[in-house]
Image (cartoon, rainbow, N blue to C red):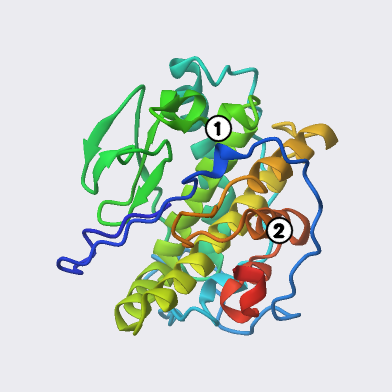
Amino acid sequence: MIIAGLLGLGAFVFAVLIVGAALANNTRDYEADSLVSPPTSRPDGPRGTTDPGDPARPAVRLDRSLKNNTLYQVGALPKTRCPAGSANIYNSGQLKALIMKTSLCMGKAWKPRLEQAGIPFTPPKYAIVARSGRGACGDFPMRGTIVPYYCPSNMTIYASTSAMASGRGDARGYGDLVSWHGGIIGMMAHEYGHHIQQLSGLSQTRWEQSRRASSESQRLAISRRFELQANCLSGMFMRSVSATYPIPAARRQNLFYFFSNVGDWPGYPRDHGSPKNSGAWFRQGWQRQQAYQCNTWAVGSATVS
């Protein structure tokens, strides 16, 4: 989820929710969907070989477009050591510690690949609380929701540990889907994916397109492609740490089930993609392990509905 109220869009506030009623039907069995097919090869383009801050190195011109973004030159993430331990998601202190620990793993995985492609890297900030708070993009969690979100104005990920695990008000928690901590960390990797979209210019270009959209249906379609791309980036990261987290076959199925049961449900805005496509794009990142395979902007509308 990404909040854009403070992106210089004036009164235009476009808040997107990743769950809505996603937990209203959490008894469905996971069914594998076929993978989607973005372009079959990585786009060519300038790739850095030294520190982007090196004054002796010519500046790399980044492609900030949606379909041909420099991010798609990143390739696969390196296998990253990230033992999670046995954190209990219902213990706020333990869950917060795990979120912060795995955030360092996310930085270790993404930083070298982004810099190699010429994309300057800065880690996101975090505001993790036990219950609720207020930050640069407003209340967190947002009223009536449990979800974490990324605020691009200050590059901060906001989350409530108790809301994510146990729910809040009428919104049920992620723990009702998967009590294993990998589900919530996968969701935090989705938010980190929004940070990657911000660093690569995808976020800014997306908002420009949203502003120019002539209808609400067009804006929602843009939002779905953006959010499903973050699912794919999450899948890439979770696969990169799978050996040491660890994520054995049974836990992998937990992750696939989790992401196949969040998304848009009847009666809620169609801004994140169907549960089926939510799961398919997470699995796309997990199995294909290449950034260009997360190009949701280059595929047909059916796979991002």
- The residue positioned 23% from the left and 58% from the top of the image is 5
Quadrant where the C terminus sits is: bottom right
Q: Is residue 236 above or below residue 63?
A: above
| Three-letter code, disc 1 | Tyr
Report the front residue among 133 and 285.
Answer: 133
Q: Please indicate whether residue 249 sits to the left or right of residue 185 in the image.
A: right
Residue 1 numbered tag = none
Residue 174 numbered tag = 1
The answer, for residue 243, to whether it is visible in the render is: no
* Residue at disc 2, secondary structure: helix
| Three-letter code, disc 2 | Ala
Q: CA distance from mark 1 to mark 2?
A: 19 Å
Tell me the crowding category of disc 1: few under 14, some 14 to 19, or many 20 or more residues within 10 angstroms, Cα based: many
The tally of labels here is: 2
Q: Are marks 1 and 2 in contact (CB under 8 Å)?
A: no
In the displayed orientation, state which residue is furthest to the left: 10
* Residue at disc 1, secondary structure: helix
Residue 220, how many percent across, how many down? Answer: 44, 69
- The residue positioned 66% from the left and 60% from the top of the image is 277
Residue 13, how many percent across, how many down? Answer: 24, 61
Q: Which residue is mark 2?
A: 280
Tell me the crowding category of disc 2: few under 14, some 14 to 19, or many 20 or more residues within 10 angstroms, Cα based: many
The answer, for residue 227, to whether it is visible in the render is: yes
